[in-house]
């Protein structure tokens, strides 16, 4: 018996399940009748051993490390991996744009001059809008995530202390509940999101460890992304450290994602 894929209807929010063979297909919601796409399966990982230090790593095919995180061996050492193409030099990488397909989430690579135009995914055949590359280094992204994790910890501690001291005091910042509309906000920055709880946990661990190579692999695999501050969403569930929401505006409209709780505000 094939395994089931869990997801939410993008119209009414009801939790659904479908066989993994239906991954990437559109099916009618049994509750509201609207067509909803079954999420693509997570990409499989392959094992890679650095030939210099013999350290073993699990990576997503097509997302080879630039250098070994242990001994900093150059990325050409990953060229023997099945299903992985290594860019010959830095100039070629600078001339290409890589982004996750909106349907199957596999990494699509296009020439740099295709920014803002249309490009067909070679895996599933869906036409994508080529994302204009942002001039933002992996180091800056990791620094932002470290700040987010620290802010979540401090905010949670202060909130607990405040509840004990003054239980009837109204919250200064209103937080939405399940089923309510929300706004994702981070002043002056894009809001980081993850497509699963596992990806959110990995994103947090990489930020704490300051693992730039790991973050690059995670970002290129399409398991995490960023949305503009002010993006609206519908709360599916809430926790201490993160919310599960369904995006209701922008390029990722209809996607169910996980967001740090300190960046989810009542609309």
Image (tube, helix red, strand yellow):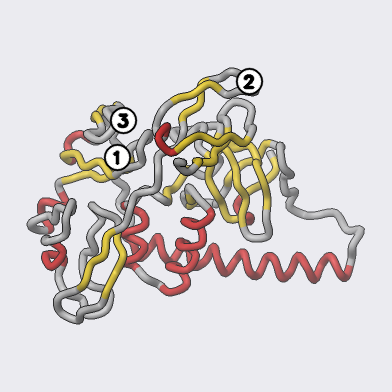
The front one of 157 and 11 is 11
Near-viewer residue (48 or 76)? 48
Q: Is residue 78 left or right of 174 when viewed as pictured?
A: left
Instruction: Tell which of 46 and 253 is nearer to you.
Output: 46
Q: Describe the element under mark 1 as helix, strand or loop.
A: loop
Regarding mark 3 in the picture, which secondary structure is present there?
Answer: strand
Q: Is residue 69 above or below residue 156?
A: below
**Does residue 162 sit above or below 117 in this rendering?**
below
Per the rendering, the mark at residue 61 is none
- Which mark lies nearer to you, 3 or 2? 2
* Tag 2 secondary structure: loop
**Residue 128 disc label:** 3
Res 32 label: 2
Q: Position of residue 47 (x, y in %)?
A: 26, 65
Camera-nearest label, 1 or 3 = 3
Q: Residue at x 27, y 28 (%)?
A: 125
Horizontal and vertical percent position of residue 72:
20, 76
Q: Residue furthest front?
A: 1
Q: CA distance from mark 3 to mark 2?
A: 27 Å
Location of residue 105 by image quarter: top left
Residue position for label 1: 132
Distance from the alpha carbon under mark 1 to that under mark 2 = 36 Å
Nearest to N terminus: mark 1 or mark 2? 2
Q: Position of residue 79 (x, y in %)?
A: 12, 61
């Amino acid at each position: 018996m094939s395994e089931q894929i869990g997801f939410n209807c993008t119209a009414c929010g009801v939790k659904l399940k479908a066989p993994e063979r239906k991954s990437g297909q559109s099916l009618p919601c049994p509750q509201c009748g609207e067509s909803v796409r079954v999420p693509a399966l997570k990409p499989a990982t392959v094992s890679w051993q650095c030939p210099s230090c013999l350290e073993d790593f699990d990576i997503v095919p097509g997302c080879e490390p630039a250098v070994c995180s242990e001994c900093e061996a150059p990325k050409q050492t990953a060229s023997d991996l099945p299903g992985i193409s290594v860019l010959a030099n830095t100039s070629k990488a600078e001339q290409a744009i890589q982004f996750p397909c909106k349907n199957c989430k596999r990494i699509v690579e296009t020439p740099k001059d295709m920014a803002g135009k249309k490009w067909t995914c070679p895996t599933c055949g869906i036409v994508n809008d080529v994302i204009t590359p942002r001039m933002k280094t992996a180091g800056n992204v990791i620094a932002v995530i470290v700040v987010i994790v620290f802010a979540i910890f401090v905010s949670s501690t202060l909130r607990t202390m405040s509840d004990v001291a003054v239980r009837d005091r109204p919250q200064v910042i209103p937080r939405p509940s399940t089923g309510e509309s929300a706004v994702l906000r981070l002043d002056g920055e894009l809001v980081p999101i993850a497509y699963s709880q596992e990806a959110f946990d990995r994103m947090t661990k990489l930020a704490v460890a300051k693992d730039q190579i790991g973050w690059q692999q995670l970002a290129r695999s399409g398991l995490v992304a960023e949305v503009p501050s002010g993006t609206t969403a519908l709360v599916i569930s809430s926790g201490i450290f993160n919310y599960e929401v369904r995006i209701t505006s922008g390029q990722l409209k209809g996607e169910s994602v996980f967001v740090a709780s300190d960046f989810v505000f009542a609309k």
